[in-house]
Image (cartoon, coloured by chain):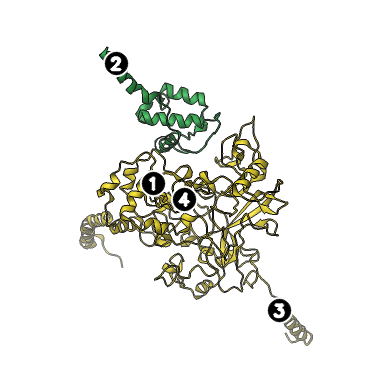
């Protein structure tokens, strides 16, 4: 109905006035609301809230203790430990019972499953061939130079490497603190371990940043939420120990001796399910869909929720070729780098491959990796898998897990059929590989130090290792789609032992399906022909 | 005579720390703490490692004592004894040294 414009103006004016008044009231309110609102938390909790809560739990201000004021001599770590032990009288004793200290564990009644003993890996190979002093930068103790190290001396325990909160603490050869560190200042500001403390060693496994694991490197310290929803400061802001719960200085973690059972099994008194498992927080039925929840029985959460590893800025090492190491230019070691600055060749280590956003390898896994020691005969498989995963579809404890698949070549003794322990880390003139560049001499020296037999002959062999992927969990928007696995050539194409919908075909089902289609066509065809012949359309 | 002795004592006190050989290990620590805050790949100062220069070049650099392309004195970015340690570290692991080093 048309209105004469003159008549409608008073109500319209009123409406406009009311609108403007409303705006006047609402605007300041909305500005206030914006100022007062906390930064939108993405996911559960926030970094700031989590850390404020942690700071409150401390009941002692260590700067008030006279004994921690020192003064401590440059690099005198043991003196600091003695000071700590005056109050924390049982701390060293507790710590000495853990694998962080012994670097040696027994498994299935056999000794030697640890870094300090006979374990072989794909990276710096072994430490017992005389490389202890360099490798023990990462030992939570002081003075671990060789096998004469006194594992019973309490002052040798390094409290600060795990409890430093300043970020100023650093370890050098044999695990001694750098003499430049202001020890008293560090000692007065101790606290619970954070990402940085654990990361000081665990981000640098394999000899350098991002080398060993693929899902742990120092980019996590500044990661956006998309890289790791748990540890990112924009995500939940969690620390390692929030999941790797500890008791009596024993940090929960799947080390070499994890029993052949599900990781979810409780590890510590009071747990109904291991704190380290996803289900401890998320329950074992976290999806709205029944079908997705059923996957929990046979598929690890990590398999769908970590679509790729090394998703930070740093690539992870996927190939290490010892067989090509030791080339020199004008008698000197050299390095070659790719366009991004990552080493593609170093004289010390040989050819290397670094990759980002790597698709995991999927394998049945019940929590048990079977490691290889220097004293074990070489497994028959070629390439040699140094730590094959145990599990199958029929194993009730096994699930499909994502792994980083690492390849390497390394020296071995073809006569004794064992791996060898070359002496790598030493200056020229000592016989060390990185000083004199002679692998045969380095192996001879190393095996002497390790007290193991060596035939005098060596060759290179291809070895592979598996590293379970469990960190760098992606936001739910990036989770794998069903068809990534339920497809003819999907991610699980190689995982054997069961029927996977969408991937596998069964003769019976296919036969019945095709038969129904063919019979239908035939039926319709014959019916049509009969009707046509009878002239009744 | 007494004045001369005093003068000599003061002179030694001042010059000793400068002349004394710094600590390689301490130098690595200070190099990481001070220099590496700007001198990393992608940052304003561009990456610098011990390998960036030869032993002679590092010695010449510290003798000149200039920082930021000669625009400011080097002791603006570190205490003299720390710079001494850093020089020892960089020289000991320079590109033509017996133990060249990329880290730091």
Q: Chain of mark 4?
A: A
- Write down the residue under mark 1: A78
- Residue at 51% across / 28% down in the picture? B53
Residue A427 in picture, x, y percent from top left: 56, 36
Q: Residues within 10 Å of mark 3 (few under 14, many from 20)?
A: few
Q: Nearer the viewer, mark 3 or mark 2?
A: 2
Q: Chain of mark 1?
A: A
Alpha carbon distance from label 3 to label 2: 107 Å
Q: Are dots 4 and 2 on a single chain? A: no
Residue B102 in picture, x, y percent from top left: 52, 37
- Write down the residue under mark 3: A508
Residue A402 visible to an observer of this rendering:
yes
Tag count in the figure? 4
SS for dot 4: loop
Q: Are dots 3 and 4 on a single chain? A: yes
- Residue at 28% across / 44% down in the picture? A69
Residue A32 in picture, x, y percent from top left: 24, 55
- Write down the residue under mark 2: B5
In the rendered image, which quarter is residue A405 located in? bottom right
On the rendered image, what quadrant is the C terminus of chain A found in? Answer: bottom right
Alpha carbon distance from label 1 to label 2: 42 Å
């Amino acid at each position: 109905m048309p209105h004469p414009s003159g008549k409608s103006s008073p109500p319209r004016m009123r409406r406009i006035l009311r609108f403007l008044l409303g705006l006047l009231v609402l605007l300041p309110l909305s500005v206030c609301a914006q100022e007062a609102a906390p930064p939108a938390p993405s996911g559960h909790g926030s970094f700031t809230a989590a850390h404020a809560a942690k700071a409150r739990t401390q009941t002692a201000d260590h700067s008030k203790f006279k004994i921690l004021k020192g003064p401590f001599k440059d690099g005198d770590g043991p003196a600091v430990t003695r000071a700590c032990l005056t109050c924390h009288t049982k701390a060293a004793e507790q710590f000495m019972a853990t694998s962080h200290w012994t670097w040696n564990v027994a498994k299935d009644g056999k000794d030697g499953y640890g870094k300090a003993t006979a374990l072989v890996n794909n990276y710096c190979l072994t430490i017992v061939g005389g490389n202890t002093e360099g490798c023990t930068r990462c030992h939570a103790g002081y003075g671990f130079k060789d096998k004469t190290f006194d594992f019973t001396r309490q002052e040798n325990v390094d409290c600060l490497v795990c409890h430093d909160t300043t970020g100023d603490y650093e370890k050098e050869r044999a695990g001694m603190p750098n003499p430049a560190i202001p020890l008293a200042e560090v000692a007065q500001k101790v606290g619970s371990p954070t990402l940085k403390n654990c990361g000081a060693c665990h981000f640098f496994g394999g000899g350098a940043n991002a080398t060993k694991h693929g899902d742990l490197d120092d980019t996590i310290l500044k990661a956006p939420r998309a890289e790791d929803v748990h540890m990112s400061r924009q995500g939940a802001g969690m620390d390692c120990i929030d999941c790797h719960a500890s008791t009596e200085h024993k940090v929960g973690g799947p080390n070499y001796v994890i029993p052949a059972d599900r990781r979810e099994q409780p590890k510590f008194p009071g747990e109904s399910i291991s704190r380290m498992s996803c289900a401890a927080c998320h329950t074992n039925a976290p999806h709205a869909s029944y079908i997705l929840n059923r996957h929990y029985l046979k598929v690890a959460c990590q398999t769908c929720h970590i679509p790729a590893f090394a998703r930070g800025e740093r690539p992870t090492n996927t190939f290490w070729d010892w067989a090509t190491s030791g080339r020199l230019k004008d008698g000197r070691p050299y390095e070659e780098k790719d366009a991004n600055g990552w080493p593609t060749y170093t004289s010390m280590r040989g050819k290397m491959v670094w990759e980002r956003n790597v698709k995991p390898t999927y394998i049945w896994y019940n929590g048990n990796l079977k490691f290889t020691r220097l004293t074990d005969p070489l497994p028959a498989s070629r390439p040699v898998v140094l730590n094959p995963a145990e599990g199958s579809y029929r194993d009730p404890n096994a699930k499909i897990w994502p792994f980083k698949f690492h390849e390497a070549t390394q020296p071995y003794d073809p006569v004794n059929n064992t791996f060898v322990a070359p002496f790598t880390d030493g200056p020229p003139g000592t016989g060390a590989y990185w000083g004199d560049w002679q692998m045969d001499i380095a192996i001879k020296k190393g095996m002497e130090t390790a007290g193991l037999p060596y035939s005098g002959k060596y060759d290179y062999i291809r070895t592979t290792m598996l590293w379970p992927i469990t960190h760098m969990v992606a936001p739910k928007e990036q989770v794998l789609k069903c068809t990534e696995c339920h497809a003819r050539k999907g991610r699980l194409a190689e995982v054997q032992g069961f029927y996977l919908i969408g991937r596998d075909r069964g003769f019976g089902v296919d036969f019945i399906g095709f038969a129904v289609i063919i019979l239908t066509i035939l039926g319709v065809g014959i019916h049509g022909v009969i009707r046509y012949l009878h002239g009744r359309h | 005579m007494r004045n001369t002795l005093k003068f000599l004592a003061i002179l030694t006190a001042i010059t000793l720390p400068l002349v004394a050989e710094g600590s390689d290990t301490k130098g690595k620590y200070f190099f990481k703490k001070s220099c590496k805050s700007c001198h990393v790949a992608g940052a304003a100062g561009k990456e610098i490692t011990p390998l960036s220069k030869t032993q002679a070049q590092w010695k010449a650099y510290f003798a000149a004592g200039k920082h930021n392309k000669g625009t400011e004195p080097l002791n603006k970015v570190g205490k003299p004894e720390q710079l001494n340690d850093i020089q020892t570290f960089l020289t000991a692991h320079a590109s033509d040294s017996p133990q060249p080093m990329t880290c730091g």
